């Protein structure tokens, strides 16, 4: 009887796994480059993602891929592909809706009362773009009813693959289900081909969002200061405490006095040095 080929069933063979030495070295490299802390319990996840990358490069096994990248024998841009492979990109339109309720019900009316001429907003880990486009929809809708105001949205991420998707603004149709119907009519374009289950964000809204690559663990951020709003949600959870605090301090430097920082609902900055006051659930205002 012929032996079964485990690869035919998507099962990794023993020689297509990462050794403990390789995992430790890769985890150190990833944390050094991105700040992401990959625990040993995530080894299987890491193997699965790198196995796909090894196949793309026609490398015999992920063990061989690891040796090549750890030995510096790939082209320099392969580290960017490695980072893209290991980053987590969970995103939805109107994710954690309480934040957007607070934005439209409290923050934007306050800026209107203060006669703010232009609201500058930064989505600091934008993934495939659902968050910054959500923000753009709400800001655009608000200023349409408050003449004399304007807005700009900056959206950044470390993963160049998701940035490419975000710039195109094309998504599966069901992904915009959380978008309220009135906003969907104004800012979402449906395909004329009923067989194409895709939508695209309207061009006038896409023009309002500037996308770029930025690594949050860099010592300084090569962008202007003076943001009224910064959304950096569900990113700190991947960093150790020291890195979390450093990132929060750098984000605060980019906020205007009185500006707002929105973090993910499972994230905490208790015990960190900062000049923020909590004003709602994981919403903070700079002094």
Image (cartoon, rainbow, N blue to C red):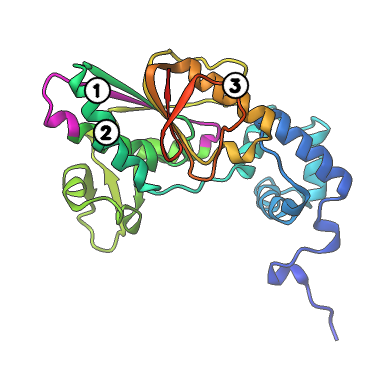
Above or below 205: residue 151: above
Q: Is residue 151 magenta?
A: yes
Q: Residues within 10 Å of mark 3 (few under 14, many from 20)?
A: few
In the rendered image, the residue lying farthest to the bottom is: 1
Give the spatial CA distance, label 2 vs label 1: 9 Å
Q: Is residue 155 magenta?
A: yes
How far across and how far down the image is residue 74, in percent?
Answer: 74, 33
How far across and how far down the image is residue 127, in percent?
Answer: 47, 40
Residue position marked by numbered label 3 in the rendering: 273
The numbered disc on residue 111 is 1
Q: Residues within 10 Å of mark 1 (few under 14, many from 20)?
A: some
Q: On the rendered image, what quadrant is the N terminus found in?
A: bottom right
| Badge count | 3
Name which of mark 3 and mark 2 comes first in the sequence. 2
What span is in magenta? 142-160
Give the spatial CA distance, label 3 vs label 1: 27 Å
How far across and how far down the image is residue 120, in percent?
Answer: 33, 21
Residue 91 left/right relative to 110: right
The numbered disc on residue 106 is 2
**Residue 77 seen from this side:** no
Question: Residue at left 61%, top 20%?
Answer: 218
């Amino acid at each position: 009887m012929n032996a079964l080929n485990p690869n035919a069933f998507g099962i990794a063979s023993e020689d297509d796994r990462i050794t403990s030495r390789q995992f430790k070295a890769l985890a150190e490299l990833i944390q050094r480059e991105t700040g992401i802390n990959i625990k040993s319990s995530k080894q299987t996840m890491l193997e699965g993602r790198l196995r796909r990358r090894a196949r793309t490069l026609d490398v015999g096994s992920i063990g061989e891929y690891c040796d090549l990248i750890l030995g510096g024998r790939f082209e320099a841009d392969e580290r960017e592909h490695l980072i893209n492979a290991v980053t987590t990109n969970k995103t939805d339109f109107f994710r954690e809706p309480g934040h957007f309720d607070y934005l439209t019900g409290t923050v934007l009316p306050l800026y209107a009362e203060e006669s703010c001429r232009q609201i500058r907003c930064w989505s600091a880990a934008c993934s495939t773009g659902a968050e910054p486009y959500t923000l753009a929809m709400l800001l655009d809708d608000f200023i349409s009813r408050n003449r004399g105001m304007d807005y700009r949205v900056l959206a950044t991420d470390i993963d160049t693959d998701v940035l490419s998707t975000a710039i195109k603004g094309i998504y599966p149709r069901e992904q915009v289900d959380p978008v309220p119907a009135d906003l969907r009519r104004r800012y979402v374009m449906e395909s004329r081909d009923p067989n194409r289950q895709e939508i695209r964000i309207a061009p006038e809204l896409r023009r309002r969002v500037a996308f770029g690559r930025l690594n949050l663990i860099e010592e300084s951020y090569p962008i202007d200061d003076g943001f009224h709003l910064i959304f950096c949600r569900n990113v700190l959870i991947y960093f150790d405490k020291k890195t979390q605090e450093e990132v929060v301090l750098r984000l605060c430097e980019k906020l205007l006095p009185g500006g707002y920082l929105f973090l993910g609902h499972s994230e905490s900055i208790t015990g960190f040095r900062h000049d923020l006051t909590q004003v709602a659930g994981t919403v903070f205002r700079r002094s």
